[in-house]
Image (cartoon, grey):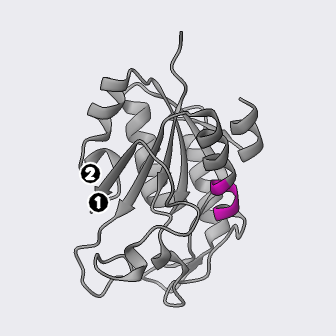
């Protein structure tokens, strides 16, 4: 019997709701993540929650403050909690890869914040490590970026670029509805 996919929920923390953050896309992200979590929890399937622990004490994601905490509805039952201080969830503690291997899990479903940063990096690594990866684009969001030359790259542009980068190479890009219906 094939093990169900592990849902990996990346960095859905209060800090990303801070007014200090730039403009964001996909306001439905967190609701879609909660739908995925509810579905996984109702089926008793494996859930990995990931938190970013910034080494910068001024960051909205620094430990010891509200911004470090998971958002309401994300903070429920789970099988593994990974704390990381870099972009990839595979470089956190405890080891995501060791846990997946020990559990015999070969497929992961990725969602969370930020689409083009920690979510994309984790998906690329998972693909490179040989996992089957579904990337739930409408259950991710990111933020506008202003380049050094002053050019604005919108969150929507970054999200589309991530989908183009991942789909068919590192992952299959899917919607929340597709992830739930399998």
User: Residue under circle 2?
Assistant: 92
| Residue segment shown in magenta | 30-34
- State yes or no: discs 2 and 1 in contact (Cβ < 8 Å): yes
Q: Nearer the viewer, residue 75 or 8?
A: 75
User: x%, y% of residue 23?
Assistant: 61, 82
Q: Looking at this view, is 37 or 176 the one in front?
A: 37
Q: Which residue is mark 1?
A: 86
Which is nearer the eye, 134 or 67?
Answer: 67
> Where is residue 82 drawn, in percent x and y?
33, 51
Classified by dominant secondary structure, the portion drawn in magenta counts as helix
How many dots with numbers?
2
In the picture, residue 96 is in which quadrant?
Answer: top left
Q: Secondary structure at mark 1?
A: loop
Q: Secondary structure at mark 2?
A: loop
Disc 2 vs disc 1: which is toward the camera?
2
User: Does the magenta segment cover residue 2?
Assistant: no
Mark 2 nearby-residue class (10 Å; few <14, some 14–19, many ≥20): many
Name the quadrant of the C terminus. top right
Residue drawn at x 40%, y 24% as measured from the top left: 130
């Amino acid at each position: 019997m094939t093990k169900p996919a592990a849902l990996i929920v990346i960095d859905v923390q209060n800090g990303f709701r801070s007014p200090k953050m730039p403009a964001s896309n996909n306001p439905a992200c967190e609701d879609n993540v909660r739908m995925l979590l509810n579905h996984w929890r109702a089926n008793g399937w494996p859930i990995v929650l990931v938190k970013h622990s910034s080494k910068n004490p001024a960051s909205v994601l620094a430990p010891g403050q509200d911004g470090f905490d998971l958002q309401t509805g994300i903070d429920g039952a789970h099988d593994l909690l990974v704390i990381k201080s870099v972009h990839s969830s595979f470089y956190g503690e405890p080891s995501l890869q060791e846990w997946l291997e020990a559990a015999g899990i070969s497929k992961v479903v990725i969602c969370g914040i930020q689409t083009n940063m920690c979510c994309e990096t984790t998906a690329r690594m998972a693909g490179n490590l040989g996992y089957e990866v579904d990337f739930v684009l409408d259950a991710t969001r990111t933020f506008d970026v202003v380049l050094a030359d002053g050019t604005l790259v919108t969150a929507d542009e970054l999200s589309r670029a991530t989908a183009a980068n991942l789909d068919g190479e590192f992952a299959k890009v899917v919607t929340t509805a597709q992830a739930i219906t399998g």
